[in-house]
């Protein structure tokens, strides 16, 4: 009797998609087939880890970046196998507290795929498809996937691992809605002023890139509250004080966290330890909250959570502090009221907090660093438009991604839960909130692989 196996397509080969592929390959039988589809040139990197700038560091220490929850030192051990002469981005000394270049982490993910393909001999189970998925439709007893070149693939299951979308996909000669566009900083006269919309980690990366290309003109950055990411510092493990909590409101949560920070401070423990102690319970807490409380959090507390939760590496923070102190970087609190471009540049009207009249600011270029676009009702990517138009998916009610179940299954326009379409990573933020860090995504990948094929231990059937 011939074994049929499953055909599973993973749409997107950044960190989320590549790691899911690794987990599926570890579990699959001889007849199972994994299709990993990626529109960009390199599999395994995605936007976050494709940067070539060695000054763009991970925002998490190396000791916490393993791709496998049961092997916490895996990434650190991999780093120590590299020889300094093979790459200029390897730090002189590496330990669990080191913040390494993001490009190195991209190489790590690529090495995991390579190990499964060549080291473990699972290449027969994996097809790498360099193209862009433009539609997914129900077909016979499964799904039919179409890519940009016109080719179609019949599969049993498809998983969206599409990562993040740029803040704005309507660029012009002087306005870039995609801060990750390689052309965003090309041809920029180094003495001219620049305006960055947003003051989070994307803005930080853009400032570093400007400084590294010896930009000497003023760099303006604006956001509603003018908050900058806080800096990583030495911390120690702290008790899970919110484990099992069932908060009724965001106010209750805020009070509990502030109270715990006060208790920790009395013991000489930094606030960072308290924030880090929330992480194992964040998804459960989020799913417990009523939707109105989630909306209240997004309106009032999200910026404060983001700057405390998503912090800068100390080396990065030192460069940003120098730029602020020397006047190279200027932070504004307010919003951009309008942008008017002409042949020489852009005039931005800034409505600053506490001011009655807008402030005109003349700049050579504007780059939108406000963070990924998460309102899927506004995203123009053909695949997203296709899924929404056919009713196979619907935006989540918070405007953070697509609606999914706790098992990562897509929810259709009619409320039906799909048994063939799933999603992982940032697209699931509305359901899980914490879906962008390595520990969260690796858990998603492990659990979804178990659900789609079976536990890792069962993979021995494929190689007996």
Image (tube, grey):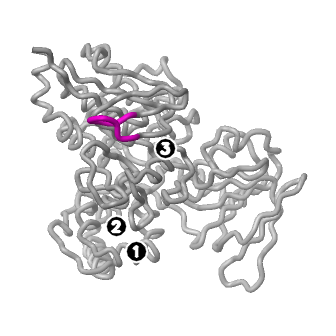
Q: Label 3 neighbourhood size at 10 Å, few (<14), some (14-19), many (20+)?
A: some
Q: Using the image, determine if residue 330 lies above or below residue 265.
A: above
| Residue at image mark 2 | 271
Q: Is residue 16 magenta?
A: no
**Residue with the mark numbered 1:** 295
In this picture, residue 135 sits left or right of residue 96: right
In this picture, residue 140 sits left or right of residue 41: left
In the displayed structure, would residue 216 be above or below residue 267?
A: above
Tag 1, which secondary structure?
helix
The residue to which callout 3 is attached is 383
In the displayed orientation, state which residue is furthest to the front. 140
* Label located before the other in sequence (3 or 1): 1
Q: Secondary structure at mark 3?
A: helix
Which image quadrant is residue 330 in? bottom right
Residue at coordinates 30% horizontally, 49% vertically from top-left? 440
User: How many discs mark residues in the rendered view?
Assistant: 3
Q: Position of residue 192 (x, y in %)?
A: 82, 52
Q: Nearer the viewer, mark 2 or mark 1?
A: 1
Element type where label 2 sits in the image: helix
Q: Is residue 98 visible from the viewing direction of this image? A: no
Q: Check the image and report above or below for 223 versus 323.
A: below
Q: Read off the magenta span.
A: 137-144
């Amino acid at each position: 009797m011939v074994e049929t196996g499953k055909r599973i397509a993973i749409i997107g080969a950044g960190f989320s998609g590549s790691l899911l592929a690794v987990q599926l390959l570890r579990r699959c039988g001889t007849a199972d087939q994994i299709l990993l589809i990626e529109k960009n040139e390199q599999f395994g990197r995605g936007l976050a880890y494709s940067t070539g700038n060695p000054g763009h560091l991970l925002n998490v220490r190396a000791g916490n970046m393993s791709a496998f929850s049961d092997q916490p030192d895996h990434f650190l051990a991999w780093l120590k196998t590299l020889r300094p002469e093979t790459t200029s981005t390897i730090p002189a000394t590496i330990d669990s507290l080191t913040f390494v270049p993001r490009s190195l982490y991209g190489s790590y993910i690529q090495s995991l795929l390579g190990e499964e393909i060549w080291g473990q001999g699972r290449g027969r189970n994996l097809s790498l498809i360099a193209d862009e998925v433009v539609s997914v439709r129900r077909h016979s007893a499964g799904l039919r996937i179409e890519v940009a070149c016109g080719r179609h693939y019949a599969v049993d299951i498809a998983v969206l691992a599409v990562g993040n979308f740029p803040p704005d996909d309507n660029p012009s000669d002087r306005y870039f809605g995609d801060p990750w566009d390689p052309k965003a900083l090309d041809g920029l006269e180094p003495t001219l002023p620049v305006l960055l919309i947003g003051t989070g980690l994307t803005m930080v990366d853009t400032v570093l890139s400007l400084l590294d290309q010896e930009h000497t003109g003023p760099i303006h950055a604006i956001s509603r509250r003018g908050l900058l990411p806080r800096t990583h510092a030495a911390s120690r493990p702290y008790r899970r004080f919110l484990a099992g909590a069932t908060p009724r409101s965001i106010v209750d949560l805020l009070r509990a966290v502030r109270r715990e920070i006060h208790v920790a401070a009395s013991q000489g423990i930094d606030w960072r330890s308290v924030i880090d102690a929330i992480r194992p319970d964040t998804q459960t807490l989020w799913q417990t909250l009523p939707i109105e409380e989630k909306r209240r959090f997004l309106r009032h507390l999200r910026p404060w959570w983001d700057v405390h939760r998503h912090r800068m590496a100390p080396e990065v923070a030192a460069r940003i502090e120098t730029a602020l102190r020397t006047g190279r970087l200027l932070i504004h609190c307010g919003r951009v009221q309008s942008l008017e471009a002409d042949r020489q540049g852009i005039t931005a009207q800034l409505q600053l907090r506490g001011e009655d009249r807008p402030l005109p600011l003349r700049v050579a270029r504007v780059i939108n660093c406000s963070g990924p676009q998460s309102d899927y009702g506004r995203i123009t990517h053909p695949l997203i438009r296709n899924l929404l138009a056919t009713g196979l998916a619907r935006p989540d009610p918070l405007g953070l991604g697509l609606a999914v179940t706790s098992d990562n299954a897509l929810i259709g326009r009619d409320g039906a839960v799909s048994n063939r379409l799933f999603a992982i990573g940032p697209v699931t933020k509305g359901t899980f909130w914490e879906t962008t860090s390595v520990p969260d995504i690796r858990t998603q990948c492990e659990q979804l692989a178990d659900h789609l094929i079976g536990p890792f231990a069962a993979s021995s059937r494929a190689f007996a």
